[in-house]
Image (cartoon, rainbow, N blue to C red):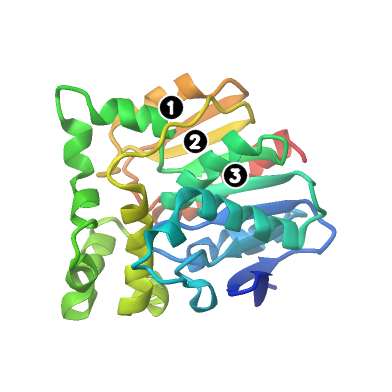
Amino acid sequence: MTEQRAIETEPGLVFDVLVDGAPDAPLVLLLHGFAESFHMWREQLPALAAAGYRAVAPSQRGYSTGARPRASDLANYHFDKLVADALAVADAFGPGSGRFHLVGHDWGAGIAWGMADRHADRVASLTVVSRPHPNAFNRALFLPDGEQAQRSRHHKTFLEPNAASKVLADDARWLRERWAKCGVPAAAAEDYLAVLGNASAMEAALAWYRARGAIRAPLGTVTVPVLYIWGEADDTVGRVAAEDTRDFVSGPYRFEALPGVGHFAVDQAGGRVTELLLAHLASHQA
């Protein structure tokens, strides 16, 4: 049964974490994206436990109330610290220096790409949903056709000083309309707003974008086994960035394009995502 725990990784950082599965089972770490929360893995957590894994989904820095340093100091939300947080949570549930499976969506996938690059010895397999390898994204972003730049224009909006108030205005109308357009169930939207629907949490979530700036830092070629799931109707990631991700993976690689599925693939096609994830894990045991 999925339960919520509080895990302190260091003084001043207490993360809310959803956990399911036997304590001695192989670890699967699941990282949520924006604008969601750890609730997005509601279907995958029990499915992973039933398949014999220990599934762990943290509410990441800024999303957990106990791990929300000042958003005005962007150093608190530097990419390196986000990667370190995820690794610390994995260490809290698995043996130190042990390998684990890694899953991420959107921003969580960005962190997962970074972990697979910098800590390949710890990652048994990587599953990314919606978010291409940063190098593929950057390359697509600067193509003359401007297609990926147009898809990513909201990132610059998130850098504006009053972005949080705009996103939350009128009972988070912008978010609600976006979720509905992308097939996110109303109940899931309420779960996400229970975490993000206040100014403090939203400022922290947007600090991830502001600390990074408009461009993703380049990473190296990923050597661990990768499953990349991309919805063909994703309005934020075009086909060029998605398909070019293969250029930056040297290990075993599987690319799955889901017809009619948008950016929030885990909400819109959770059953298919779970099926693909379990098959990938079974092929690359820790």
Residue highlighted by disc 1: 245
Q: CA distance from mark 1 to mark 2?
A: 9 Å
Mark 1 vs mark 2: in front:
1
Residue identified by numbered label 2 = 228
Q: Residue at x 57, y 26 (%)?
A: 253
Alpha carbon distance from label 3 to label 2: 10 Å
Query: Which residue is disc 3 drawn over?
Result: 277
Between the C-alphas of marks 1 and 3, the distance is 18 Å
Residue 3, visible in the rendered structure = no
> Looking at the picture, does residue 58 appear above or below residue 240?
below
Q: Return the residue nearer the eye: 270 or 202.
A: 202
Q: Earlier in the sequence, mark 3 or mark 2?
A: 2
The front one of 142 and 78 is: 78
Q: Amino acid at mark 2?
A: Tyr
Kind of residue indicated by mark 3: Leu
Indicate left or right for 27 with 272 as reference: right
Please state which amino acid type lies under the numbered disc 1. Thr
* Cβ–Cβ under 8 Å for marks 1 and 2: yes
Q: Considering depth in this image, is 68 or 182 the residue closer to the camera?
A: 68
Q: Residue at x 51, y 66 (%)?
A: 38
Which residue is painted at 40% across and 70% down in the image? 188
Residue 153 visible somewhere in the drawing: yes
